[in-house]
Image (cartoon, grey):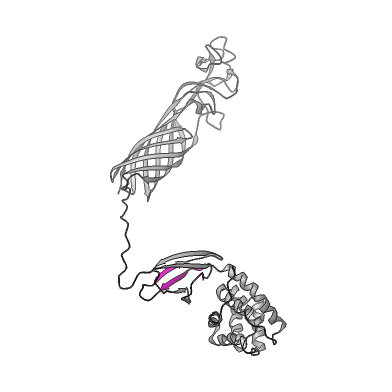
Amino acid sequence: MPRKPPSAAGIGLVQACVGVATLALFASTAVAAPKKTTGSEADRGLALAKSGDCVAAVPVLEKAELDGHRPSTASALAGCHVALGDLILALEIYSALADEPKDASWSKSDRKAQGDARDAADELDARIPRLELSVTPNDADYSVKIGTRDLGKKRGPLPVPPDEKVDVVISADGFEAHTESIVLGEGAKKQLAVRLDRSGGTAPPKPVPPPTKALGSRYWLGARFRGYLVPNFVMNIVVDGGTTTFVPAGEVTFTARLADVDLVAAIGATSLGLGATAVKPPGTPNTEWEIVESDLVGITATLDILYRFRLDEAGVATLGLGGGVGIGFAPIGDLYRWQAYPTGDPDDPSTYAKCKAPNDPAGSYRYCNQLDKDAHRYGEGDAAWGNGGARPVIYPWVALPLVALAFRPDDHVEIGVDLGVTLQGFLMGTGVRFGLD
């Protein structure tokens, strides 16, 4: 809703910003014809404002208004205050100008300036942020100062300079002054509840919440065991056949505890061993069955990020929720592959056995052959990814979600268990860590 034009007291506030003499000039507009403005000063100020040099134009226009008020110079002065960021002063000038009685001595530009003032005031009114105060006790007859502007006992939405950090000072007889620092953007509205404390120390002390016990040490060194259950249906995402496999891993951990967030860095070794298992690419004929074995060992570096929720007031038992990322590579061991032939039902991968050599045993040439892609698949170590083989070199590690339950029997000892879902399978783990501080 547009702001109501200011009264004579409001106009006086505007004039106080440009000089005591201007107050008398604006107040006189309702009872006397304006004094003729010195043309040279007014023209020079208007020219400076039109050129965009408002820093130089403001003092010239103020002097011209002191010498003799004209709506055209007042409007230009308000426009320069807008350009320089003083929207509140500009609004008050525009509002006073819009409420000013018309005078027969005005020029065409004066009449236009006065006629446009209301629209300019309404536009500025929408841009200026407002602060609504709620002050207790109710009997406090308070005054308000916002930044350098003393608003006295004014109530209702109070104008605030936009995009500027200002101190709001609320004071009243018999109470301690209260100060709040705020920053409001253009057009913003904020409600601020303030409680004034009575002078002389009669105000009741504010309750102090009991300190929350920290979650033990800030830094921890530990070790953990993690196992990954890879069900057969997970293998079937990338191959036919396969088998349910359990992959064990051991890791050394370093934990940094930031408030209720744990950052857990770990480095460890993972056994990627696999017993003789029949697999083939999905959708390919039975002649593509192979037997694979692995004695690979992977080295992983991971980072878990867990937000811990206290399960008791002291935080002895906590529940962590989060996820983890990392990278692994397999520098130790090999992946071995054999072409395979059926010893029973060709559609049953459990009946397949390793080929010894091309067409060995006799009659198995459809399965045991020496095609280029199969010639070295008689128990030799496979080539790495990127070289036509299936042996992993570098692989990602992602866990989401991770759930960690921890118990701290001592401020420097913590025992925990982990559960999660990873790219490698379903994670289960347990570990212990020791505080370093």
Q: Is residue 172 magenta?
A: yes
Which residue occupies 30% across, 70% down?
A: 202
- Which quadrant: the N terminus? bottom right
Query: Outermost residue toward the top?
Result: 362
In the rendered view, tell whether residue 216 sits above or below residue 124: above
Residue 215 spot, x, y in % from top left: 33, 48
Query: Outermost residue toward the front?
Result: 139
Q: Foreground: 233 or 224?
A: 233
Q: Is residue 256 magenta?
A: no
User: Can residue 188 be seen at all in this image of the molecule?
Assistant: yes
Which residue occupies 62% across, 71% down?
A: 122
Residue 245 sits in quarter: top left
Residue 108 spot, x, y in % from top left: 72, 82
Position of residue 434 in the picture relative to residue 369 (left or right)? left
Query: Outermost residue toward the right?
Result: 108
Residue 40 spot, x, y in % from top left: 66, 88
Query: Outermost residue toward the left?
Result: 410
Q: Foreground: 133 or 266?
A: 133
Q: Foreground: 209 or 326?
A: 209
Residue range (magenta): 156-180
In the rendered view, tell whether residue 118 sits above or below residue 318: below
Which residue occupies 43% across, 39% down?
A: 402
Residue 357 spot, x, y in % from top left: 53, 15
